[in-house]
Each structure stands twice: as structure tokens, then as C-alpha cells.
Amino acid sequence: NMGIICTGVQQLARDQEQFQEIIQEFFSAQKAMIAQMEELNLMWKGPSKDAFMKQFQSDCLSMDALKKELEAIKEAMAYAKVEYRKCDSNISSLVSSLKI
């Protein structure tokens, strides 16, 4: 039994807006974390510092990869909205051209 997904341009626009907000929150949190780590790097001395900072750099690479994926999803959502509008317009044209 397959479910049917019903959507509309307004829902797609809301989803896209919400997703953009999530991305912005992610970017802001990442920038804040990097700033805090730079401060910590200046203040911290000790044998564990290098290992910790290397791990943080590795984590930053993972976050950058995630950012790229989020941006790709955002672009796909924008494309889907444009295509949905085209299809909606085409269907409206076809329906209005029917002679009953």
C-alpha cells in the first residue's frame, strides 16, 4: 500500500524557507565554535593541545562536507519548486484546453 504525497507550491516554499533557516543556524553555530576554538588555542598550553586541535581540524573538514551537502539539498529544493510550478502550469493549460 503506497501512500500519496500531496504538496503545493506554498508548502514547497515553506519547506525551502525552513531549510534555509536551518542552514543559517548551522553556519552561525559553526562560526561561533571556530571563534571559540581560536581563543582556546591561544590560551591552552599542554601536551593534549595538539591532538585536540588536530581532531578539531578534522571535524571542521567534516562540517565543511556537511555544509556542501546542505547547500546541494537547498539547490535541489529550489529546482523542485521551479519544476513543480512548470508542471502545475502545464496541467492547468491542458485542463483548460479540454473541450467537454
Image (tube, rainbow, N blue to C red):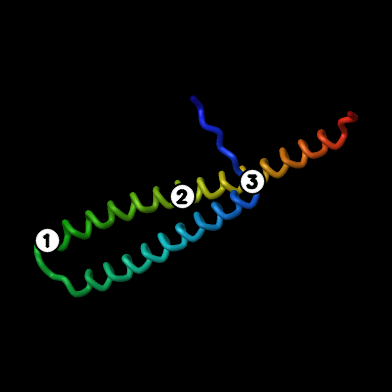
Above or below, 93 relative to 35: above
Residue that badge 2 annotates: 70
Label 3: how many Cα within 10 Å (few below 14, some 14–19, many 20+): few
Q: Earlier in the sequence, mark 2 or mark 1?
A: 1
10 Å neighbourhood of mark 1: few (<14), some, or many (≥20)? few
Closest to the observer: 98 or 82?
98
- Is 91 on the left-hand or right-hand side of 39? right
In the image, residue 14 lies at what x, y percent? 57, 55
Task: Please report whichever mark, 3 or 1, sits nearer to the chain's N-terminal start.
Answer: 3
User: How far apart are labels 2 and 1 at the CA level?
Assistant: 33 Å
Amino acid residing under circle 2: Leu
Compare residues 79 and 43 and report the one nearer the observer.
Answer: 79
Instruction: Provide the residue designation for mark 3.
Output: 8
Q: Secondary structure at mark 2?
A: helix
Of badges 2 and 1, the one in the foreground is 2
How far apart are labels 3 and 1 at the CA level? 53 Å
Q: Residue furthest front?
A: 100
Image quadrant holding the C terminus, namely top right
Identified at 60% across, 53% down, the residue is: 13
CA–CA distance in space, label 3 to label 2 = 22 Å
In terms of image quadrants, where is residue 35?
bottom left
Say left or right for 45 vs 42. left
Numbered disc total: 3
The secondary structure type at the circle numbered 3 is: loop
Residue, disc 1: 48
Marks 2,1: beta carbons within 8 A: no
The residue type indicated by label 3 comes to: Gly
* C-beta proximity under 8 Å, tags 3 and 2: no
| Residue in view at x 50 percent, y 50 percent | 71
